[in-house]
Amino acid sequence: MRITIVALVACFAIFPAAMPATAQQGVPEELPTMEPLNRFPRMMQEYLVARLEALYHANHARVMALCTREEALAYRDEVRAKMPLVFGEMPEKTPLNLRVTRENDRGEYLIRNVIFESRPGFPVTANIYLPQGHSGPRPGVLCLCGHSSNAKAFPMYQTFAQALARMGYIALIFDPIGQGERLQYHDGEGDSVVGIGVREHNVAARQQLLVGEFIGTWFAWDGIRAMDVLLAQENVDPTRIGVTGNSGGGNMTTYSVALDDRSTMSAPACWIASWYHNGINEEPIDAEQCALNALGLGLEQSDLLAIQAPQPALMLTQEQDFFDQRGSLDARERLEHIYRLLGGEGQYAYHVGPNVHGYWLDAREAMYAFFSAHAGIDAPAGEPEVVIEEDETLRCTETGQVDDMGAKCIFDFTREKSLRLAQERGEPSGEELRRRIQKLLQLPERDGPPDYRVLRPWTQRNYVRSHANQFVLITDPEFGAQAIVTKLEDERRAARPLRGDGPALLYLPHLSSDAELREDERLRALQETNPSFFACDYRGIGESRPDTCRPEHFFHLYGNDYHYASYALMLGESYVAWRVHDVLSTLDWMASLGYDEVHLVAQGWGAIPGALAAVLDDRVERVTLINAPTSYAEMAETKLQQWPVSSLLPNVLEEFDMPDLYRELEAKHLQMIEPWNAMMEPAEGAK
C-alpha cells in the first residue's frame, strides 16, 4: 500500500477517559479553557423515541387486531419464522462430554456437580438437584441465572433450584457465560480483568459483532444444551419440563421458549416489559438482551413468549422493578389476547409483587404453584425450608474457574472465525467493495441536499478564524436526526451560507469539532490554509453528545453511547451507518452551495464513517485520516479492545476490513496519521 503515514501525538484521550481540558501543544497558553459545545444533548434520545413509538404502536395494533384462531396461529408462526433473522443459524450439536465432579447427598435430594461442553472445548458448569425418595418419572425444570457474580451459587437462585428438588422436581441450574466458574476474561486469581457479569458480556459481544455472531445466541445455545443434559437424567418426564429464571435468567427463559420447543411451561421473572419502554426510559440493557434486528422485524419482547402459545406461561413482575411495569402490563394484554384466541384461557398467568427487581419469595411461590398445577404435583403451599450451600460446595471445577482447566473462551472462537473470514472474503476493491459497503450499511435514499436551520454565529470560540457560522442539517426529517455543521468565516454572518466555488475541507471529529478545532495544532494549521473550512458533528458526537442515561456515562460500557448503538442494532441498522448517512448528507449540502471538491479530514471515531463515506462519494477528492483504526480484524483478534459498539459494523469481517478501504482511498491521496490499534493507542510501527 502506498499510503503516507505520519506520526502525530494523539490530541485526545483514549477511551474510556474523558477529553482533556488543558490546552494542547501548539495552542497559545493564554487561551481560556472552554467546555465543548453541546447544545443538542437530547437529540439522540428524541430520535430514538420517535423510532420506537412508531414501531411499538404498530406492533400493539397488529396483535390486538387479530380476531380468529387462524390469525393468531399465523402470527405466531410468522414470529417463529423470524427467529433465524435475530439469532442466526444454530450450530450443530456436538458431544456434551458430560462428567460428574462431585455429589452432595442431602437426604431429600442429591446435588450433582457436573461439567458439560455446549460447544467443543467450551465447558459449562452446572448443578443438578435430584429429588430422592420418589417413584416414577419426575418433572424437570431448567433454572436460568440472572447477572449475579456467583451465578448458580447466588442464594436467591440456589434457593429456587433446591426448593424445586424438595418438591420432587429434577432441577438443573448452570453458570452463564462470564459468571460463576465461567469467567471469559479471567485474571488468573478468580476475578475478571474487565468486570464479572454484564461487563464481560459487553466486551465479548463487541468482538463477536464483527464476525457476525450475537452473544445472546451463545447464551441461548448453552440453555439448549443444558436442556439436553436435563432430559438425559434418569426418571425425568419429558412431558413435564419447566423453564424459569430471573432478570438475565428471565431473558434467557424467554429465549428458551422462543428457540426450544421441548419445555412445556415457563415462568420468566423480572424481564418481559418492552424494548420500547427500556428505550424511552433511557435504560441501557445488557448486550445479550439486545436481540439483533428484532425491532426492525416488528417484534417486541412479548412476541418471543407467544411463540409457544398456548403453552402454560407465567409472567412474574415486581411493581418497583426498573423494568417498567407499564411495559409488562402491555405485554400481558397482548399475550392474554393471543392465548384467548388460541383457546388457552387459564394457560397464561400474570403475577406482580410489591418488590424491587429480583426473584423474591412472592414470585418464587407463584412459580411453584403454577408449575405444580400444570405438572400435576401435589406440592405443599409456600416455599419449603432450604439450606443455603457455600459456593465451594456447588463448585464444579477444582479451582473455581474453567479457565484453569485450559478451556477455550469465547474470544478464542471469535478470533478463529475472524482468521477464517479473512481467508474467505479476499481483498475487495472498486465497485465490488462499494457494493459490499452498501450491503452492510443499508443506507436510506437521499433526495437532494437536506433542509437546514441557521444558528446564531460564534465569535469567541478561539478558532483560528474570527467567526463561525453554524447550521443544523436535518438528515432524517421523519424522525428528527441532525448533523451540526460549522463553517469558519472571516466576517460575522447570521444568514444562509453564501455560495462558493473551488475546493473545501470537511472535518469529522473524534469527539467534538468545537474542542478539536481549538486544541489540535494540526487542525489549527488546516484552518489557516483552507479558506472554505467546514466541520460536521455527526449524530451522537460533539453538539449532540447525549446527556441521557447518566451524563457522566458517555464512555461507560453501558453508557448512553452504547445505549443508542445497541438500539441501532435491534433496529437492524448500525450507529456507523447512521453517521455515514450524516456525512453523505453533509456532502450533498456542501455541493448545493458549490463545494463539490472536498478534502475530507477525519479523526478517531470519525475516521470510520469518514473512510466509508470517502469510498462511496466521488466528491471527496482527498482524504486525511488521523488515529484511524488499523483494522476491524485486529479488534476481533485482540482479547481486550477499546473501540465502542458505536464504531463497529455488524458482520463487517465477512465482507471487508478497514485496510480494503485504505487501499481504495490511495487514489484519493490518502494520508494516514498515527493509526490507532485495537486499544485505541498508537499502532506499533506508526511513525
Image (cartoon, rainbow, N blue to C red):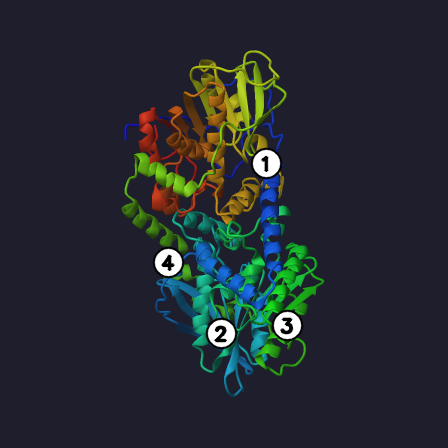
Looking at the image, is 316 positioned above or below residue 88?
A: below
Pointer 2 or 1: first along the chain: 2
Residue 378: quadrant of the picture: bottom right
Residue in the image at 56% along x and 39% along y: 554
Alpha-carbon distance for marks 2 and 3? 33 Å
Pointer 3 or 1: first along the chain: 3
Crowding near the residue tagged with mark 2, few <14, some 14–19, many ≥20 C-alpha atoms within 10 Å: many
The nearer-to-camera label among 1 and 4 is 1
Q: Quadrant of the N terminus?
A: top left
- Name the residue type under label 3: Glu
The nearer-to-camera label among 2 and 3 is 3
Residue sitting nearer the eye, 429 or 202: 429
> Residue 357 at what x, y percent from top left?
64, 59
Q: Name the element at disc 3.
A: loop
Q: Is residue 189 visible?
A: no
Alpha-carbon distance for marks 4 and 2? 23 Å
- The residue at which mark 1 appears reads as 480
Q: Is residue 20 visible?
A: yes
Alpha-carbon distance for marks 3 and 4? 46 Å
In the image, 344: left or right of 125? right
Alpha-carbon distance for marks 2 and 1? 52 Å
Residue sitting nearer the eye, 132 or 308: 308
- Name the residue type under label 1: Gly
Tag 3 near tag 4, CB within 8 Å: no
- The residue at which mark 3 appears reads as 345
Pointer 2 or 3: first along the chain: 2
- The residue at which mark 2 appears reads as 128
- The residue at which mark 4 appears reads as 408
Q: Name the element at disc 1.
A: loop
Alpha-carbon distance for marks 3 and 1? 43 Å
- Name the residue type under label 2: Ile
Q: Of the numbered discs in the image, which one, if any, rests on residue 431? A: none
